[in-house]
Amino acid sequence: MPELPEIENYKVQLTHYILNTSIEKLVIHRARVANVEADPVNLMLSGNRIAFIERRGKYLNLHLHSGHRLLISIVAGSSLYYGLREQNEDRKCDVELQFEDGSSLYYTAGRQGVFHYCSARESQEYFAGLGLEATDRKLTREQFIKLLKGRRSALKTALMNQSLIAGIGSYYADEIAFTAGILPSAKVQELDEEALGKLYEAMRNVLQEAIDAGGHMEGQPLTANDSLTGGFHALRRVYEREGEPSVRSSDDKVTKMEVAGKKAYYCPASQFEN
C-alpha cells in the first residue's frame, strides 16, 4: 500500500518532468476511474499547463494554470509511469495525460483509485477529513505529543489514523515503532511525554529516510531511467521480515503480531510497552 514516502517520491520526480509542459489531451481508457468525459474536459485542458504539484494524503494534486486541479489518488494497486508515447505504444493504463512534447503520464488506478478534474474548492473537499501531514513543519514535537497524549488506542492504530496525522500506513507505522523502541501494540494513553517525543523523532527520521530512498514500492519505476523508486524496501528493519534476524541483535528474530486486526512486525528484544 503506497504511503507518504511513495507519493512524495512521485511528486518530486514528476516535478522535474511535467511542470509547465503544455497539455495536449486526456485519454480515458476506463470510465469509472474519471469523474469527467474526455471530450468536454479536453476543451479546457488543451494548452493548459501544470504549475505546481502538491501531495496531500493519498493524492497527488496537480495545480493547473487555469486554477483547476487534477487529482490522482495513489492507493493499493495504483501506479504511475511517465515517458514518450512512441516508446510506450503498448503500455496499458486507465488514464493517460498526453503532453504536446510527445510525452504522457500513464495512470493505473487499481480497484479504488480515481483521476478527477475539479475546481480548487472541490479539491479541498477530498482533504477535509485529513489531519496534518506527518512531515508538515507545522506538526511540531509539542503538537504531536498533544495529539496523541491521552488517546485510547494501540500505537499502530493511532499512527495510522489519517484524521489525526496523514500519511502513515501499516508499513511505516511498524518501522516508526521499531525506531522508537516501542511495541506497535503499546497503549498510547500509557506513553509518557519522553516516549512520545522519541516517537515523533522516529516518525520524522523514518519518513525522511524513506523519501530519500524512493519509498518501498519495488518494481514500479516512474520512468525508464528511474533507479530510485522502491529503494527503501531493502532498508526496512521489521516490516514483513518475520523470522529474520533483528538488525539490533542477530540472536533475536523479527516477530509478527496482530494489532486491531492488522499484522504488525517488531523486535521483541528491543521494543517495549513504553
Image (spheres, rainbow, N blue to C red):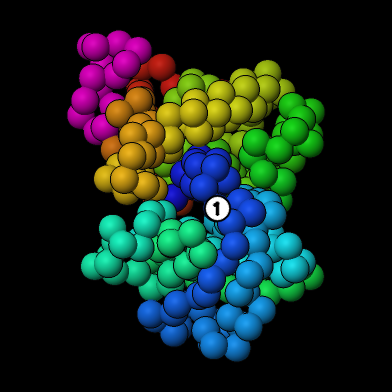
Q: Magenta residues, as a range? A: 241-257
Question: x and y percent of residue 38 in the render?
Answer: 52, 84
Q: Secondary structure at mark 1?
A: helix
- Nearer the observer, 233 or 49: 49
- Nearer the observer, 186 or 78: 78
Residue extending furthest toward the left: 243
Residue extending furthest toward the front: 101
Q: Residue at x 64, y 58 (%)?
A: 50
**Main structural element of the magenta stretch: helix, strand or loop?**
loop
Amino acid marked by disc 1? Ile
The answer, for residue 217, to whether it is visible in the render is yes
Q: Quadrant of the C terminus?
A: top right
Q: Residue at x 64, y 54 (%)?
A: 20
Residue 243 lies in magenta, yes or no?
A: yes
- Reading the image, the residue beneath label 1 is 18
Q: Residue at x 66, y 67 (%)?
A: 48
Question: x and y percent of residue 199 in the render?
Answer: 60, 26
Residue 107 vs 258, above or below: the answer is below
Q: Quadrant of residue 105?
A: bottom left
- Nearer the observer, 208 or 94: 94
Question: x and y percent of residue 180 in the render?
Answer: 53, 22
- Nearer the observer, 180 or 40: 40
Residue 262 vs 135, above or below: the answer is below
The answer, for residue 183, to whether it is visible in the render is no
